[in-house]
Amino acid sequence: MNDIIRTPEEIAARVKALESILIEKGLMTTQMVDRLVEIYETEVGPQLGAKVIAKAWSDPDYKARLLEDATEACKELGISGLQGEDMVALENTDDVQHTVVCTLCSCYPWPVMGLPPNWYKEPQYRSRMVREPRKVLAEEFGFSVPESKEIRIWDSSSEMRYWVLPQRPAGTEGWTEEQLAELVTRDSMIGVGDAKAAS
Amino acid sequence: MNGLFDLGGVDGLGPVDPPAEEAIFRAEWEKSIFAMFSALFRAGWYGLDSFRHGIEVMDPVVYLKSPYYEHWLHSFEVAGARNGELDLDELDRRTQYYLDNPDAPLPDHQPSQELLDFANAIGPAGVPAQRPTDKPVNFAVGDVVRVSIMAPLGHTRLARYVRGKTGVVIAHRGSFIYPDAAGNLLGEDPQHVYTVQFDGTELWGANAEPNTTVTFDVWDPYITHANQSAGAIA
């Protein structure tokens, strides 16, 4: 195996070299690259999960369906697919804070969240979240969870894709789903923060 | 394999340090790598499990020090070398060419409707890993189970920090491709998947933070029934 730590220039050159070979083999095109990038930069991202959460906050029947089978509940809103073929939504309560990690690689529910942030994929979060979650949440994310509340860490070791249904912020009675969705952050669906407060 | 990628509970790696804002792709090469994943999956170079194992066999120091998407590059090379589709000497030559000529263009080529259609379809369609099986469901919600101490040399999803630990089954998820088979190119061998919950003190002893639990998904062969005096066997 290659034990060279490459410079950014060396990585870029090797990727370009591989791309040139794959283009000549007819396995990829630059048009395909542009389209896949466009999808995950502009179409599939945490705004989709936020829409689901806002609906769950607004509609108790939908929330029940989401907690029963998140994959099917998301399909009702046209949300499905790669790295979310089998999803589970985890409801935060006054007694438990759920947080998601993948200690072995970088598993993350793409259809509702898009591609994971880099810190989620890097060794620091992956190593520490199962061992000292309170410290990581408080010190790295500014998110202090009282010891009276259980922190339940979900290690995404199988093809199940977990994400968090945060608690609905106080003072949002009568808000529309569109207004509520604005309060749902990516971090709140990973479980490293709360939804935004009503302002 | 007992690799460095198996990071749960490893100490000394430093702070997480999440940035306030960050681009989805931090460099142009990351975009190409991201697209190659789907393109080479389509071409049959790997399944998801053997793709992951291609990352796991990276040099461990490089694994820890390299940007995330470079991991994918290593796995593409492993797959291409294995199936004979990629000449690594040719890759080295072209790499040197683009190092010497960083602005040199990619080869001229025509757009492909077939590849574009695939790019549009792969996201919504996904790649389901559920598979039917006739194997019995050996564990029920509430069962107290002990995780195997096996330490296979190839691909597994059995992380070291849960091996030998005792927890409670909290869900049966259905039957899925078994990574210990598929990741080692031994077929799919579907197995039932369960979610097991562990108390923090079971994993970290007196050093566990208060009131923390960890759930971990296991395939059937990873667990056995623990002390049945716990009274939780269905």
Image (spheres, coloured by chain):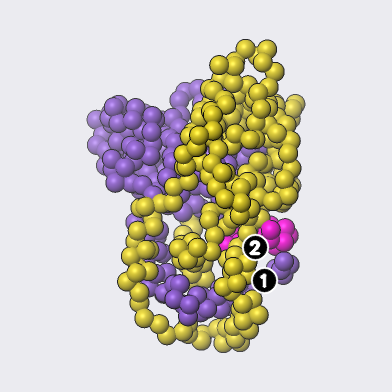
Q: Which mark is residue A6?
A: 1
Look at label 2 and name its amino acid. Ser
Please indicate, yes or no, whether residue A143 appears anywhere in the rendered image. no
Residue closest to the eye, A81 or B62: A81
Is residue A119 on the magenta stretch? no
Q: Nearer the viewer, residue B31 or B2?
A: B2
Pointer 1 indicates a residue of which chain?
Answer: A
Name the tint of chain A in the rendering: purple
- Magenta segment boundaries in residue numbering: B57-74
Specify the colour of chain B: yellow
| Residue occupied by mark 2 | B66
Label 2: which secondary element: loop
Residue B132, percent from left and from top: 46, 39
* Residue A59 left/right relative to A84: left
The residue nearer to you, when weighing A171 against B94, is B94
Question: Can residue B168 be seen from the camera position used here?
Answer: yes
**Dominant secondary structure, magenta:** helix
With respect to residue A116, does B25 lie above or below? below
